[in-house]
Amino acid sequence: MRPLKMCWYPAMAALLIAGLLTGRREFFLLLFIMGFVLLFSLALNLWTLLSFSYVQRTERRVCVKGGETSLRVEIYNDKPFPFAFMRVTVAPVARSSRVRLSFSLLPRSHASFTVPLFCPYRGVFGVGMTELEVNDSFGLVRTRFNMLSLPYYRQTEMKVYPRLADISLPSAKRTDAKVFGSTGAHIAKQGESYAGLSKYTPGDPFKRVHRAVSAKRRELYVKTYDAPFETSVLIAMDTAVGGGDEEERLYLADLACECAAAVAHYSLRTGRRVIFGCAALPGAPDVCETERDFLRFYEGLAELRFTEQGDFAEVFQRISYSDVEAVYAITARSDAVIREVLSMSGIKNIRLIELSTGKGAEAAAESASVGGVWTVRLAVGDDIAAVLGEESVMR
């Protein structure tokens, strides 16, 4: 094919020059025939690009960072003529490792490929074909087409969750904290633990009316319940990841989400409520009351988007600290302004988790109190469960 292409275009140029010099019609006739063949090949390629059939699907649409799945790509030729040469570019999760599939198809046939998908980053990605290249049967015209420009084409969505580091619980850790005694009792209008009775007030639901006591005393009484004494943990994440190349920013964003997931999972298991705030959540902060809310929080971390710039102090202006027991600030920036904002919050138990791409051994060893804020330095590749262990996470 390639020798024919190398001779075809010089021959057309020679026929044009010969026709102009001699004025003989034979040269122009041959030139028009060769040009018509090129136009026919180009039209055939365009028809193939716009009408070929395909199927692409992933083995799993969700995965955890570091896991692997696969993408199945099937190309069908339902035309009465062969596809002499086709090349498809497939974009996996890691854009730097694109895959090119080359094949030829006979009439009424198809080709199938299985592309492994390694998931080195957290986030939501579109995987699948991005570019299609078609050569005609003579190898004269090569046509490339960007499939993402088609209005009806959509890549397969792949969601990659951050890794969840399991911080072990202390053996004597309390899983529920309640205040006992009449002086410290908290009364709620609904709950599971029956506490006593109170007189009916307008607005109380009738289903809580204690019928026996109300009939005996000839006055409406309603049931009350013990309300558990809740403590909250605030996780403030800095979604601004600047500097370095794109891959370094992706790794830092993943590490921030892994830290948030580890701290939130640990806190919920120890009976604490988790409040999560970041600049990417412009409204009210996300609140997780129980372990059942963790899956929703975990899915939100997978979809969280990071930027190169952002105001970390703005997160603290939208959060109330009335019942916050501890604050965990996660950032990839080493900034004195962040420590100043944390020190002025009025909370004593503050952990600043600084992320970097340095060597794990060096970063893990640098954990100390800086400016009144306990700082834990964590690097990409560190053991999060070991660095954020009991001494760093809960006192």
Image (cartoon, helix red, strand yellow):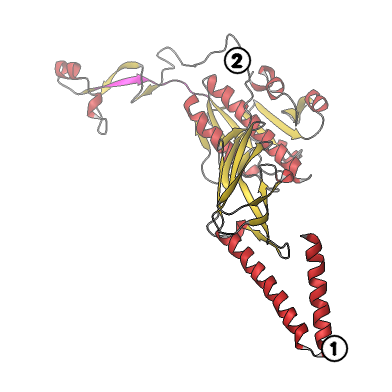
Q: Which residues are magenta?
A: 222-231
Residue 44 versus residue 392: which sits nearer the camera? 44
Looking at the picture, how far across and down is residue 280, in whole percent? 59, 45
- The mark found on residue 21 in the picture is 1
Q: Quadrant of the N terminus?
A: bottom right
Q: CA distance from mark 1 to mark 2?
A: 92 Å
Query: Residue 275's quadrant in the figure?
Result: top right
| Residue that carries the numbered disc 2 in the rendered image | 169
Looking at the picture, how far across and down is residue 92, in whole percent? 66, 43
Query: Residue 244's quadrant in the figure?
Result: top right
Q: Image check: 283 left or right of 334?
A: left
Residue 133 versus residue 367: which sits nearer the camera? 133
Select label 1 or label 2 by which is in front: 1
Tell me the element at label 1: helix
Looking at the picture, how far across and down is residue 60, in whole percent? 56, 35
**Residues marked 1 and 2 touching at CB (< 8 Å):** no
Residue 232 visible from this viewpoint: yes
Q: Residues within 10 Å of mark 1 (few under 14, many from 20)?
A: few
Q: Is residue 208 on the magenta stretch? A: no
Q: Image check: 185 left or right of 349?
A: left
Residue 308 versus residue 182: which sits nearer the camera? 308
Residue 328 visible from this viewpoint: no
State which tag comes first along the sequence, 1 or 2: 1
- Residue type at the position of mark 2: Leu
- The mark found on residue 86 in the picture is none
Examine the rendered structure and indicate whether residue 50 appears above or below residue 116. Answer: below
